[in-house]
Amino acid sequence: MTSEIFELPIESITVAHIHSLIASQAEEGPRFELKRALATNDGRPDRWMRDQSAIGSVARDDIAKELVAFANAYGGVIIVGIEETDDSPKRANSIFEPIIPSVHDCADRLVQSLRSVIDPPIPMLEARGIEVADGGGVIVLRVGSSPSAPHGFGRPSNAYVRRGSNSEPLAMRDIQSIFYERRTRLERVARISEEQFKAADDAARHWRAGKLVQPDTNQPIDSSNGLLFQLSLVSSEDMAIDNLPDRFHRKPIRIAKPNIRSLVELPGWTSEWKRGYRSVEYPFSYSSNLSKVSLRADGLLNVLLVRSDNKFHPSWYSAIIAQSFLLVEWLRRWLGRPDVEFMVQGKFEKAGNPAIAHSNGHFDTWVSIPWDSAVIGPYSLTSRANFPATHDVIEREVWDLFGAKRDGPLIVDWDLDLGLN
C-alpha cells in the first residue's frame, strides 16, 4: 500500500493515488478502512445517490463510527467508493459502481454532517472528493490521533476505538488509557509553553538590564524603548525527529517564504539554518534588533524577536504569526505528518514607553502601549484549510491587545507553494 494518502496534504491526493491503492490491493488495518458505498439499512441507495439533496443518517453514522475509532487510536484514512475483496482483512479491488455523483459537494456536505454528530469535535478532520469521471468519484476522509479524545457520535454518544482492521466499542480500560494519554499530551504542551514563556521572561530581564547582545557584534541591544515578542507553536505530540540537524542539512530543501512584510527574516534553504542540540535555528540581527527562529526535534517552533524602537504596528506581528503558520505546515509536510495539531501561544514584553499605530496603516495616529507584559492564546492550529480563520481570530486579538482598531486582515497567500514538490 502506498503511503501517500497518509503523508500528502489531502488536497494533493489524486485519482492516480486511488488507482495505485487498487493496483497494490491495499489492505484494511489499524489506520485504513474501505467502504464500497454510502451505507443504508433498507437496500436502497443513499439519498445522495438518488437526488444529491442530502446524506442519509445511516451513511453518516457508519462513517462517524470509523472516524471516532481512528481519532481515539492512531488516526487513519477512510475511502468511500472502493469495492473490496472477500479477504479478511479486506483489500481494495476496484472503484465501486455506480460512483458517488457530485463527489466534491458530497465530501463537503459529509464533513458538515459529521461535525454535527461527533462530540467533542475532531480537530484534524479532513475530507476530499476525488473525481473519477463526470464529476463523480470517491471520497477520502482523514483524521489524526486526537489530543481531544475520547470522541463519540450520536445522542447518546457511541464511542469506538480501532483494533486491527475493526472498530470496536470502547471498554473502560480504553477510556482510562485515552484519558491518561490525553493528560500526558496536555501536560507536555503546557510544560513546553511554560518553558518558552520563562525563556522570554529571562530574555526580557537581560534586555532591560543591557545584557542582551547581538550575536554578530556582541553589542547590547538598546532597551530604552521597544518590544520583545516570543511565539511558540507546540506539536500536540512529540514528533521525535531523529537526527534533526543531519536530516535537515543532508539535502538542501527550499523553504517557502510568504510575500508579506515581516520583522523576522527567514532563510530560503534548510542549509542556511545553524545546527543546535536536537534542533536547528536561524539567528538574525540588524541595527538594534534581534530575531531567532528555532525548530526542535520534539516539534517546537519558537520565534524570539526583540525590536528597539519607539513606534510599532500590529500588522508586523500578525505577519510573523502567518509566517510561522506556513513554516509549521512546511514541517508537517516535510515529515509526512499532516495530521499533527499544534498549539499557538505568544507573549509580549515592553521596555520604556513605545507607541502603537492606533487605527490605520498610515502611521499618523499613535497611542502608548497600555501594558508591560501581555499574552495571546493558546489557539489550536489544525489543517491548512483552517489557517485563514485561525489567523483572523489571533490577528484580531493582537489588535485588541494594542487597543487599536484593525484596518483589515493581513493579505496572505495561504496556498503558497511550500517548495517540497
Image (cartoon, rainbow, N blue to C red):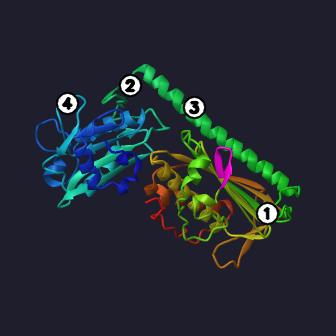
Q: Secondary structure at mark 2?
A: loop
Which mark is first along the chain, 3 or 2?
2
Which numbered dot is residue 170?
Answer: 2
Q: Secondary structure at mark 3?
A: helix
Cα distance, mark 4 to mark 2? 26 Å
Q: Quick one: label 1, few (<14), some, or many (20+) residues within 10 Å?
A: few
**Residue type for callout 3:** Thr
**Residue type for callout 1:** Asp
State whether residue 129 is above or below residue 191.
below
**Location of residue 347 in the rendering, given as x and y in whole percent from the top left corner:** 69, 53
Q: Looking at the rendering, in which quadrant would you find the N terminus?
A: top left
**Location of residue 245 in the rendering, given as x and y in whole percent from the top left corner:** 62, 49
Cα distance, mark 4 to mark 3? 38 Å
Cα distance, mark 1 to mark 4? 64 Å
The secondary structure making up most of the magenta span is strand
Is residue 36 among what the camera can see?
A: no
Q: Quick one: label 3, few (<14), some, or many (20+) residues within 10 Å?
A: some
Q: Secondary structure at mark 1?
A: loop
Q: Residue at x 49, y 57 (%)?
A: 387
**Residue type for callout 2:** Leu
Q: Looking at the rendering, in which quadrant would you find the C terminus?
A: bottom left
Q: Residue at x 56, y 39 (%)?
A: 238
Which numbered dot is residue 216?
Answer: 1
Frontmost residue, 182 versus 324: 324
**Residue 298 placement, left or right of 18:** right
Q: Quick one: label 2, few (<14), some, or many (20+) residues within 10 Å?
A: some
Q: Which residues are magenta?
A: 274-280
